[in-house]
């Protein structure tokens, strides 16, 4: 299919805490498509999205939204109802990948290693929830929002006495949260691109952060994180990590592109933290760097993802 005959809208921005990252990603994608001769416009995510898309006679949408309302199946469902093709994962896979607890339940069901976890009932007395978790879960532990990206709101809690206060503060900001086992090891991420028989894992990127872990600040601030590409892994472990990444992508039903974040524990087991169904495309983002290592230019990567709309 000749996609240069289609009018493309790069949908970016949105309302989540990752808005600025999305705008930067979207600008790079737009510039790439424009340079390559595609008929392309940009739009921010607003309430009258469908009417604006139809008024502009858009044929397909390149989604480069991150976080809530963009990566969680919401926009995907809206576009499905309007019968407008779009890039990447569809409604269910997007919702599963965005909800870390739902994703971990899927990983458990199909035997994909993921750090142990426990739900927190935020409708209950949080003091009682903190006491309950102290009894059954070892410290240090990790407190995570259920549906946020870019490590927003993630905290490693080392001391039991700090737990209740941090829990209350995080619930007040993000509402739904859960506890995850803290695993010390190598932080790696693996891009997945393609569909069907063309599906492949990209070279593994190792992330060595000066911060306690690869948090939001480390992701988007120059000089905070050392990027090692390809990762310092043996051949067999490299293949194992890539195989698990592809399995995680497929287990959630992701399509066209994703990025699988893992921690390789001291037991040499790759534990899946999460799957990002719309990876960042900024100048500092992981997926374009991995693609470049595999000999795929940024422009080629953009077009490859564009093809997932059909």
Image (cartoon, rainbow, N blue to C red):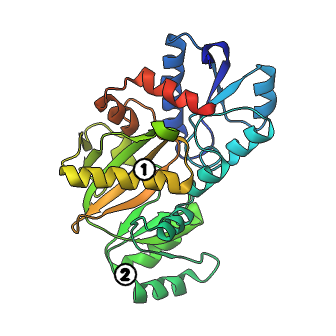
Which is nearer the N-term, disc 1 or disc 2?
2
Q: Are marks 1 and 2 in contact (CB under 8 Å)?
A: no
Identify whether 228 is placed above or below 103. Answer: above
**Residue 23 location in percent, x, y?**
53, 31
Q: Is residue 80 left or right of residue 299?
A: right
In the picture, the disc for residue 161 is 2
Secondary structure at badge 1 equals: helix
Q: Judge whether residue 86 can be spotted in this image.
A: yes
The quarter of the displayed image where residue 138 is located:
bottom left
**Residue 17 location in percent, x, y?**
54, 47
Query: Which residue is nearer to you in this view: 136 or 8?
Result: 8
Query: Which residue is nearer to you in this view: 44 or 239?
Result: 239
Q: Is residue 241 left or right of residue 72?
A: left
Q: Residue at x 74, y 32 (%)?
A: 84
Q: Judge whether residue 169 can be spotted in this image.
A: no
Q: CA distance from mark 1 to mark 2?
A: 40 Å
The quadrant in which the C terminus is found is top right
Q: Residues within 10 Å of mark 2 (few under 14, many from 20)?
A: few
Q: Residues within 10 Å of mark 1 (few under 14, many from 20)?
A: many
**Residue 256 location in percent, x, y?**
53, 38
- The residue at which mark 1 appears reads as 246
The quadrant in which the N terminus is found is top right
Identify whether 55 is placed above or below 73. Answer: above
Secondary structure at badge 2 equals: helix
Outermost residue on the front side: it is: 197
Q: Residue at x 34, y 49 (%)?
A: 242
Circle 1 or circle 2, nearest the eye:
1
């Amino acid at each position: 299919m000749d996609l240069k005959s289609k009018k493309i809208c790069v949908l970016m921005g949105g309302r989540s805490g990752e808005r600025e990252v999305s705008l930067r990603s979207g600008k790079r994608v737009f510039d790439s498509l424009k340079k390559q001769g595609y008929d392309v416009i940009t739009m921010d995510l607003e309430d009258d999205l469908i009417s604006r898309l139809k008024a502009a006679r858009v044929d397909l949408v390149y989604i480069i939204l991150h976080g809530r309302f963009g990566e969680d199946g919401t926009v995907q469902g809206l576009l499905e109802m309007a019968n407008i093709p779009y890039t990447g994962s569809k409604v269910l896979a997007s919702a599963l990948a965005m909800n870390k607890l739902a994703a971990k339940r899927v990983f458990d069901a199909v035997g994909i290693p993921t750090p142990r976890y426990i739900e927190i009932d935020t409708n209950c007395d949080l003091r009682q929830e903190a006491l309950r978790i102290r009894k059954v879960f070892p410290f240090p532990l990790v407190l995570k929002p259920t549906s946020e990206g870019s490590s927003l709101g993630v905290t490693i809690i080392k001391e039991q006495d700090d737990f209740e206060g941090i829990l209350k503060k995080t619930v007040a900001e993000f509402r739904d949260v859960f506890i995850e086992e803290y695993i010390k090891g190598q932080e790696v991420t693996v891009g997945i691109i393609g569909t069907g028989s063309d599906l492949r894992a990209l070279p593994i990127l190792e992330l060595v952060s000066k911060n306690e872990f690869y948090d939001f600040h480390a992701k988007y601030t120059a000089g905070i994180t050392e990027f090692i590409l390809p990762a310092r892994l043996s051949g067999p472990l490299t293949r194992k990590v890539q195989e698990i990444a592809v399995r995680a992508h497929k287990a959630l039903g992701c399509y066209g592109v994703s990025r699988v974040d893992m921690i390789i524990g001291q037991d040499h087991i790759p534990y899946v933290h999460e799957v990002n169904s719309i990876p960042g495309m900024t100048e500092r983002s992981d997926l374009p760097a991995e693609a470049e290592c595999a000999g795929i230019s940024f422009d080629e990567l953009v077009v490859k993802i564009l093809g997932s709309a059909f």
